[in-house]
Amino acid sequence: QVQLKESGPGLVQPSQTLSLTCTVSGFSLTSYHVSWVRQPPGKGLEWMGVIWTGGSTAYNSLLKSRLSISRDISKSQVFLKMNSLQTEDTATYYCARERTIAAIFDYWGQGVMVTVSS
Amino acid sequence: DIQMTQSPASLSASLGETVTIECLASEDIYSNLAWYQQKPGKSPQLLIYYANSLNDGVPSRFSGSGSGTQYSLKINSLQSEDVSIYFCQQNYDSPRTFGGGTKLELK
């Protein structure tokens, strides 16, 4: 069955770089896009960026200067790197499978809570 | 960016009641609208896409409607397991944007 699982550090210091991994199973990264979405505690959802089936990427303009998404098809993994973290980046980070015909998120990972604090 | 405005922000209803959540887009999104349910402590789950198409496995008491800039999610015969936060999302244009959420509680 389709599964996505995020992994990464739970605590990051301010100004440091966040690195997260999304490991997927039950589908191929060449058949579905994968997006990253984050949710600050008690708040709404923010789309961060996507890696398309062909390997190109698109980012939310608010995060574009700090964000990078890449993948390793052989390992079925998608990576997120975001630099210059601040306390407002404290959030649960989700990866989500995106249908290729429309930007609909049909499967989500369990999420990983990241706290930015010294 | 297309702004999505949900109302109400919170809602309290009784078991068996019918509830409606509204979502207003800042421009025409041509029915490219999805609804998600997020149960406490869980990740969001897709309920409805293309404004009115029910995702596989979603109970038929959920329905979506709307066009242009105005959309709604209706839950008939409210069940205890429907206590959640509901989000709308436009998938017409990039960046994908979400509504602020509607927290549904039992009265």
Image (cartoon, rainbow, N blue to C red):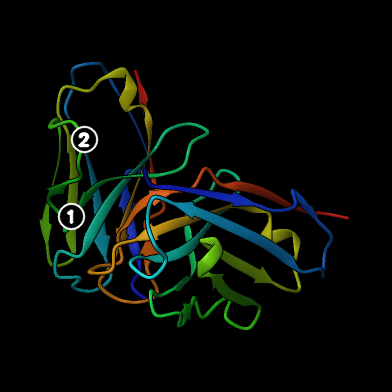
Q: Is residue B66 left or right of residue B44?
A: left
**Chain for disc number 1:** B
- Identify the residue under disc 2: B57
Where B87 sits versus B83, above or below?
below
Q: Can you name the residue that lies furthest to the front here?
A: A74
Q: Which of the labelled discs sits on residue B71, or is there none?
A: 1
In the picture provided, is B91 more to the left or to the right than A54?
A: left
Q: Residue at x 70, y 64 (%)?
A: A19
Name the quadrant containing residue B92. Answer: bottom left
Q: Residue at x 19, y 41 (%)?
A: B56
Disc 1 on helix, strand or loop? strand
Kindly identify the amino acid type of the residue bearing the numbered disc 2.
Gly
Residue A82: where, in percent of width, then height? 67, 71
Which residue is painted at 15% across and 64% down in the image?
B31
Residue density around tag 2, few if under 14, some if 14–19, many if 20 or more, within 10 Å: few
**Quadrant of image for the C terminus of chain B:** top left
User: Is residue A106 rendered to the left or right of residue B69?
Assistant: right
Q: Please say if B65 is above or below B77.
A: below
- Amino acid under disc 1: Tyr
**Residue contact between numbered discs 1 and 2, judged by CB atoms under 8 Å:** no
Image position of B43 with respect to B59: above or below: below
Q: Quadrant of residue B12?
A: top left
Percent of width and height locating residue B68: 13, 67
- Residue A79 x %, y %: 60, 66
Q: Earlier in the sequence, mark 1 or mark 2?
A: 2
